Image (spheres, helix red, strand yellow):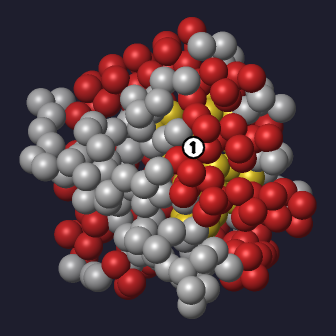
């Protein structure tokens, strides 16, 4: 189908977050039972709510990549995600995405019917990821980051964040293509909050149109509940949905093809407003 089928240009695609982790920054443990194991009942209920609220894609993550997070083994990540992916593929018609940095985890999910790999490391953690995506003809989302989750917020610095992120994503794109992933299966993510300062995150969202024009690929933005919103508003992580919706609206106006969100109902409305304003913008006044 390719990215145009999953991320068509006529809409802002809503990617609903399903973190089956104990330590994700805003929803860690929510989908686990009292013993700490993944609760498929909770996953199903949350997924149903996301889809009924407008999510077009469900993105399953088994490893926290929040700033400061510790790495887990591939075996543990597969144990957390495999049953959830199998169930979601069986229960829903929407495409299922696996949010992982490891090719072995992606292979497990894709063999179970997932159709998208969301690699926040942009192939820097496991270069064989692109080969696995190519093998399954899967859509591959290449995220920009510097360092690892444990180190990425240790004094990040850019001279020109737009140019540097674009250049580094171009290298990721080239590597993916060399590994056999066709351009029509590629999506990019500027990596909001991944090795970025407040001003870097703001510049990337405000100038998505420039970034999209340079890279020539669909762009997904994941700003939902992230720390930079707390710096702007003063809100704790549990109270950032309104700010997240504002970021969705601006990202949709600026040119985002997809937004990765926790609250699909609010994001759907915000994205609709942002896209409507983008369509109303007069190009001759730009």
Looking at the picture, does residue 107 appear above or below residue 150? above
Residue 65 occupies quadrant:
bottom left
Locate residue 176: give its quadrant: top right
Residue drawn at (75%, 82%) of the image: 41
Instruction: Please give left or right for residue 246 compared with residue 276 in the image.
Output: left
Q: Quadrant of the C terminus?
A: top left
- Please indicate, yes or no, whether residue 5 appears anywhere in the rendered image: yes
Q: Please report the residue visible at 21 percent of the width from the left and 48 percent of the height from the top.
A: 151
Horizontal arrangement in the rendering, residue 109 relative to residue 224 (left or right): right
Q: Residue at x 62, y 53 (%)?
A: 78
Residue 49 picture quarter: bottom right
Measured as percent of width and height from the top left, residue 64 is found at: 43, 60
Q: Name the residue under label 1.
A: 118
Q: Nearer the viewer, residue 147 or 75?
A: 75
> For the residue labelled by badge 1, is the local secondary structure a helix, a strand or a loop?
strand
How far across and how far down the image is residue 80, in percent?
A: 61, 63
Q: Which residue is drawn at 49% across and 15% down?
A: 175
Of residues 273 and 163, the one drawn nearer to the viewer in this rendering = 163
Q: Position of residue 108 (x, y in %)?
A: 71, 44
Report the number of discs.
Answer: 1
The answer to whether any part of residue 271 appears in the image is: no
Task: Give 240 or 130, whichever is nearer the viewer.
Answer: 130
From the image, which quarter does the N terminus lie in?
top right
Label 1, residues with CA under 10 Å away: few <14, some 14-19, many ≥20: many
Q: Nearer the viewer, residue 177 or 129?
A: 129
In the image, residue 170 sits, relative to residue 84, either above or below, namely above
Residue 169 in the image: state x and y as whole percent. 41, 25
User: As drawn, which residue projects farthest toward the top?
Assistant: 178
């Amino acid at each position: 189908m390719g990215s145009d089928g999953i991320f068509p240009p006529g809409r802002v695609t809503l990617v609903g977050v399903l973190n089956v982790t104990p330590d994700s920054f805003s929803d860690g443990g929510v989908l686990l039972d009292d013993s700490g194991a993944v609760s498929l009942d909770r996953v199903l209920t949350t997924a149903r709510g996301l889809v009924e609220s407008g999510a077009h894609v469900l993105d399953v993550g088994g490893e926290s990549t929040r700033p400061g997070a510790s790495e887990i083994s591939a075996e543990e990540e597969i144990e957390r995600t495999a049953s959830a992916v199998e169930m979601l593929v069986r229960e829903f018609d929407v495409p299922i995405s696996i949010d992982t940095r490891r090719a072995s985890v992606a292979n497990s999910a894709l063999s179970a019917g997932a159709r998208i790999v969301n690699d926040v490391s942009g192939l820097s953690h496991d270069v064989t990821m692109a080969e696995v995506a190519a093998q399954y003809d899967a859509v591959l989302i290449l995220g920009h980051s510097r360092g690892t989750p444990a180190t990425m917020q240790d004094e990040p610095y850019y001279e020109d964040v737009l140019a540097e992120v674009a250049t580094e994503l171009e290298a990721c794109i080239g590597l993916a293509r060399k590994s056999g992933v066709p351009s029509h299966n590629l999506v990019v993510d500027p990596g909001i909050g991944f090795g970025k300062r407040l001003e870097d995150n703001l510049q990337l969202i405000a100038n998505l149109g420039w970034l999209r024009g340079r890279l020539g690929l669909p762009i997904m933005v994941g700003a939902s509940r992230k720390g930079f919103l707390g710096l702007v508003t003063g809100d704790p992580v549990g109270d950032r949905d309104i700010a997240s919706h504002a970021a969705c609206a601006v990202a949709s106006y600026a040119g985002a093809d997809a937004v990765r969100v926790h609250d699909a109902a609010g994001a759907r409305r915000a994205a609709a407003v942002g896209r409507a304003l983008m369509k109303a913008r007069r190009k001759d006044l730009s």
